[in-house]
Every structure is written in structure tokens, then in C-alpha cells.
Image (spheres, helix red, strand yellow):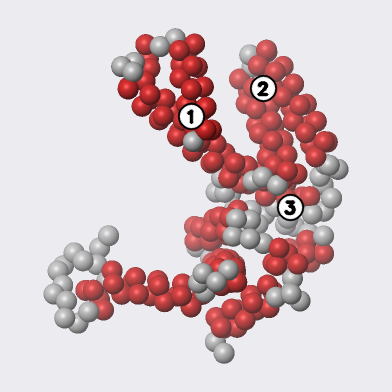
Amino acid sequence: MTPFEELVTIVARLRSPGGCPWDRGQTLESMRPYLVEEAYEVIDAIEAGAPGPLQEELGDLLFQVVLLARMAEEAGTFDIQAVSRGIADKMVRRHPHVFDPDHVSSDDEGSVAAWEARKAKERGADRSMLDGLPAALPALVRAHRVGEKVARVGFDWPDRDAVRAKVDEELAELDEALASGDPAAIEHEYGDTLLALSNLGRFVGVGPEEALRTANSRFGRRFRAVERLAAERGLLLHELDDDALDALWEEVKRAQADG
């Protein structure tokens, strides 16, 4: 058995009825933030120029790939062999100047809680449990992951109502900063408000990055519909007042909700 085959067998065992509760509880959707995190950790290792950490981070990323493929296999869609076969075929197909002996090549074709305790022991006293979060991680993803990590050692709000109250507290402080007109205070309190909202997402089972990405898409879809509606009626958006713009927006919202 090759090391890769052994990894595939281990993942299957982790997902089996007698396997790990955490691994068995994951879904394709729930793995999204972890996959992004592991990819950024690989980037960090590459930029650091350290072969050892890069080898380790590539292994972590490979585990994610094998785990996702295992979930797909359980759903009856594809397995890791199909993933491997697919990318191999694609690489051969896209590099005929390398793999096809009959191809006429040209010069430019080649261009272009217990868990955390064990981790803490391995880390040693001079490293933080947050050190594993890559610096390049998007801020909302990082906020969410920081909250998850510190919560594992009990550094968290007791319940959803408590973190929701924290959001209200931060909003009140943001209002005070806005009233003061102090740019530094406004940035500080605005950041604290976003951080509190990201932590609220953990308590309601919503990832902030995914929620904001969906909200961005929703807004873009609606605004484009507003532009189309205005054009159909011979209207120029920059010439409309607030009431007219709001009316178009509400009309689009109703139409999209109905459709």
C-alpha cells in the first residue's frame, strides 16, 4: 500500500460509523472555511521558503481534498480515483507538446478541548494557539476562525443572547465614535462591531465570509435588475432622486422574491 492509498484508507475509517465524530459530522459546505484556511497556510509556507513546513501544510491540504472526495463517494457522485483520473487526463490533454509524440511543437507552447490540549503541548509555551492562522487569511474568515479556536479553551460568550448583547454594545460605542468625529475611534469601533458580528455567526451557524459573499451577490443581482428596469423605462439612475431610486429597488426586491 502506497502512502497515498494509506491516507485514503484512513479518511474512510474516520468517516465510518466507528470513526471520528468531528470528521463524520462535516459536509461539503462546512468544509469551505477549513479548505480556504489550509490553502492560505500553504501560501504562508511557500513565502517563508521553508521546505519542512511546506511539506506539512501540503499534507494538511491533501487531507482536505481526500476528505471532500470521500464525502462525494459516500453521496455516490465520484471518488478520489475519479478526481485523480480527471486531473491526469486534463494535464495530458492540455500539454500535447509534452505527451503527444505526433504533435508538432512550437517554441512558445510551454510558457505561460483534548484536541487543543494536545496541540498546545506540541506547540510549546512560546507559541500561541492562534499562530496556525495564516496572516493572509481574509479578515472575516480570520475573525471567525479566531473565535472558534479561543472558544475551544472556554474563551467565549456563554450563549447566543450574550454575544448578541455584545453586538448592541459595540454598536452603541460605534455611535459614540461617530458622534465624536474621531476617525481613529470610528475605525476602532467599526472593527470591534464587525468582530462581534462574526462571533455571532458562530452561534447561529453562519460563516461571515460566506454570508457576506452571498449578500454581495444578492445586492449585485438586484442592482443590475434596477439598472435594467431603469433603462427599459428610459430613466437615468444618476438623475433620479432618493424616492425614485428606492421605489425601483423595492420593485426589484418584490419581483425577485416572487420569482
**x then y, percent, for residue 163:** 79, 36
Say what amino acid the circle numbered 1 marks.
Ala
Decide which of 255, 239 is in the foreground and name it. 255
Residue 169: name its quadrant: top right
Residue at (24% x, 67% y) in the render: 110
CA distance for labels 2 and 3: 28 Å
N-term mark: 1 or 2: 2
Q: Position of residue 189 (x, y in %)?
A: 68, 26
Disc 3 crowd, CA 10 A, few/some/many (<14, 14-19, 20+): some
Relative to the observer, which residue lies in front, 198 or 83? 83
Q: Is residue 56 above or below residue 175?
A: below
For marks 3 and 1 on the same chain, the one whose residue lies earlier in the sequence: 3
Q: Which residue is mark 2?
A: 185
Circle 2 residues within 10 Å: few <14, some 14–19, many ≥20: some
Residue at screen point 64% across, 75% down: 11
Q: Is residue 5 left or right of residue 232?
A: right
Relative to 191, residue 80 above or below: below
Note whether residue 188 is visible.
Answer: no
> Which of labels 1 and 2 is toward the front?
1
Where residue 17 sits in the image (x, y, percent)? 74, 75
Relative image position of residue 9 (x, y in whole percent): 62, 81
Question: Circle 2 — which element?
Answer: helix
Which mark is first along the chain, 3 or 2?
A: 3
**Residue beneath disc 1:** 255
- According to the picture, the residue beneath numbered tag 3 turns out to be 149
Where residue 31 sits, quadrant-wise, is bottom right
Disc 3 + disc 1, Cβ < 8 Å: no
